[in-house]
Image: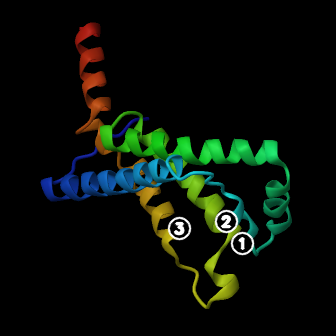
């Protein structure tokens, strides 16, 4: 069952702004990592302090696995960011972004070392879920253009 969302202009504007800001942040973070000599996820993984900390720590000791993690981290952020900015497959990108942020949150949750459950990773995780559930790319973005072209071909 598909639903057609009926948004007001302020709602569309804010949802689009959220998509663009999160997309920019992810794109920037990925490009920053790409151009930082010898960047690695190892220092972050070594900070892991919760239930799966042994797994996260183990990942840093295996250079092949760590290389894959570094690659996926950099290019995942770049591609997710570009996807959100362009409005191309943005629902899928937002789901992958949410999964990425969930892994960051699980690795180093704020409640282990502080008296809060909320941190920037949780905020971005929820932002990705909002973007996935309210697909503005179907209104403004390449996804909209592709659906419009496909509709013209079918008719």
- Compared across the picture, whether 141 is left or right of 75 comes to left
Q: Are marks 1 and 2 in contact (CB under 8 Å)?
A: yes
Q: Residues within 10 Å of mark 2 (few under 14, many from 20)?
A: some
Q: CA distance from mark 1 to mark 2?
A: 5 Å
The quarter of the image holding the N terminus is top left
Q: Which mark is residue 44?
A: 2
Looking at this view, is 101 or 155 the one in front? Answer: 101
Instruction: Kindly state the secondary structure of the residue where label 1 is placed.
Output: loop
Q: How many numbered circles does the render carry?
A: 3
Residue at point 15% right, 59% down? 10
> Badge 3 is on which residue?
121
Q: Where is residue 152, by image quadrant? A: top left
- Compared across the picture, whether 89 is left or right of 10 comes to right
Q: Which mark is residue 47?
A: 1
Looking at this view, is 119 or 13 the one in front? Answer: 119
Q: Which mark is residue 124?
A: none
Q: CA distance from mark 3 to mark 2?
A: 13 Å
Whether residue 4 appears in this view of the structure is no
Depth-wise, is mark 3 or mark 2 nearer the camera? 2
Residue at point 65% right, 83% down? 111
Q: CA distance from mark 1 to mark 3?
A: 15 Å
Instruction: Find residue 66 and report its horizontal and vertical position in percent.
Output: 75, 48
The quarter of the image holding the C terminus is top left
Q: Where is residue 139, by image quadrant? A: top left
Q: Are marks 1 and 3 in contact (CB under 8 Å)?
A: no
Instruction: Find residue 71 and report its horizontal and vertical position in percent.
Output: 63, 42
Instruction: Find residue 68 and report its horizontal and vertical position in percent.
Output: 71, 41
Looking at this view, is 115 or 55 the one in front? Answer: 55
Residue reaching furthest to the left: 9
Residue at point 30% right, 15% down? 150
């Amino acid at each position: 069952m598909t639903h057609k969302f009926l948004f007001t202009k302020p709602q569309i504007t804010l949802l689009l702004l959220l998509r663009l800001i999160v997309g920019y942040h992810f794109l920037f973070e990925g490009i920053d990592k790409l151009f930082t000599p010898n960047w690695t996820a190892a220092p972050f993984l070594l900070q892991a302090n919760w239930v799966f900390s042994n797994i996260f720590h183990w990942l840093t000791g295996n250079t092949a696995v760590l290389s894959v993690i570094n690659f996926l981290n950099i290019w995942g952020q770049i591609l997710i960011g570009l996807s959100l900015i362009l409005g191309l497959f943005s629902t899928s990108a937002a789901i992958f972004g949410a999964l990425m942020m969930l892994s960051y949150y699980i690795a180093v949750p704020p409640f282990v070392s502080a008296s809060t459950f909320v941190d920037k990773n949780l905020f971005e995780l929820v932002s990705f879920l909002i973007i996935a559930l309210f697909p503005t790319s179907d209104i403004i973005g390449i996804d909209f253009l592709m659906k419009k072209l496909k509709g013209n071909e079918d008719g």
